[in-house]
Structure formats: C-alpha cells, structure tokens
Image: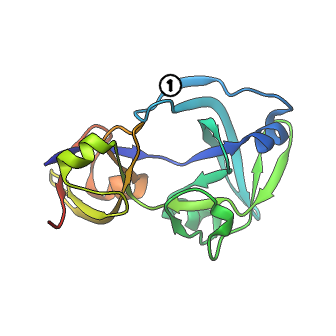
Amino acid sequence: MKVILEVSGHHCHIARADLDALYGAGYQLTPVKPLSQTGQFAAQETVTIKAGNRELREVRILGPERKYTQVEISRTEAYHLKIDPPIRECTQPESAHGCALIEIAGPKGSLRRCAVIIAHRHFHTDPQSAKKYGVKAGQMVSVKTAGPRSITFNNILVRVDPSFEPRIHLDTDEANAAGIKTGDRGELIFAR
C-alpha cells in the first residue's frame, strides 16, 4: 500500500507561557500556511536556538500552541550545535534522558530549556485509515521509497488520532538520504 511522505524541517512547538516570554504577554501566532494535519499551521514567527556559541536562526514556530515547548531538529543540526538530543516521539521533551540544555531566543526575550529532540520518524493516521492500512497505534512499520536513491526506513511509529491525515513524517536528513520530497509516495511495509 502506498502512503504520502512529508519532509519535516526543523521547527518549534510552543507553550503559552513561553510564547509570552519570547514575543510578549498575550502575543498570538500568525498563521501563514496550513499543514497537512488538521488545525496545524506554520506561523510567521520564528525563534533562534542557541547552544554555547553556536545557533540555528529562523526556526519556524508551528501552531497552535502546545502544552509543552519542543524544538525538533535533524542529527546534522545537532552536530552543528554540538549537542546530543534524544530521539523521541513527542511531548514532554524535558523528561527525555540525556536532553541537551539550549537557549530559545525571540524578539522580546529568551529562555533556557531541555526542549530539543530529534523526532522519531512516525506515521500519522486517522482510525479509519489505520484499519485500511492494517496498522494500530504504537506499532512499528517500514516504508520503501522509490527512485535512484531508494531506501527502506524501518521503525516508523504509528500514531492514530481522528484529526490526523495519513502521512509519514521524515526529517530532512532522512529525506535527503533517499532523495525524496514532500508529496512523494512510499510503499508501506508491515507485519501481519
């Protein structure tokens, strides 16, 4: 079965209190582009991520606001920052073993958090599509890409929610290794 692949570049999810600290009390995110997942959007606002004397500029904030602030980067960007963030699914990055302390800077202020992760590759899907694909929440699946740099990605975590659209999210390192772009399709592989 084929599934749509999406490339997820570095980005930041933001909690209300942290948005206040970075952009000012009561500040509201400005949506500029809807994302494939229902209700989610790329915001106009960005932050700078700092680790020691190294930084990543213009890291896009994705909305809406979240319960926890979380920055997602690639392994290559982690090498640039000279940090070793954990590979995690999502949420509560501060509980991650071995998390790296970073500074998140906005136009009105900055904060220090253990909030950076490398996102575990994952498959968003709604319950009806999950049945169609024959997968369940928490299951690990694989996807085989096409083209001259075809590769099979294993250990893709299935996440099921009624608001999800069926999409596999890979980070920029993974996409570049396989020569794929958002909208390409891969063959879903799973154990029966």
Q: Residue 98: horizontal and vertical position, in percent?
A: 64, 76
Taking depth in this image into account, of 17 and 4 the one nearest to the observer is 17
Q: Residue 30: horizontal and vertical position, in percent?
A: 65, 23
Q: Residue 148: horizontal and vertical position, in percent?
A: 15, 54
Q: Is residue 166 left or right of residue 117?
A: left
Q: Quadrant of residue 127?
A: top left
Question: At x 56% / y 70%, what residue is drawn?
Answer: 86
Question: At x 59% / y 24%, what residue is drawn?
Answer: 31
Q: Is residue 63 visible?
A: yes
Question: At x 48% / y 46%, what residue is drawn?
Answer: 9
Residue type of the residue flagged with mark 1 = Lys
Taking depth in this image into account, of 86 and 189 the one nearest to the observer is 189
Q: Is residue 62 left or right of residue 181?
A: right
Residue corresponding to mark 1: 33
| Secondary structure found at label 1 | strand
Question: At x 39% / y 58%, what residue is drawn?
Answer: 121
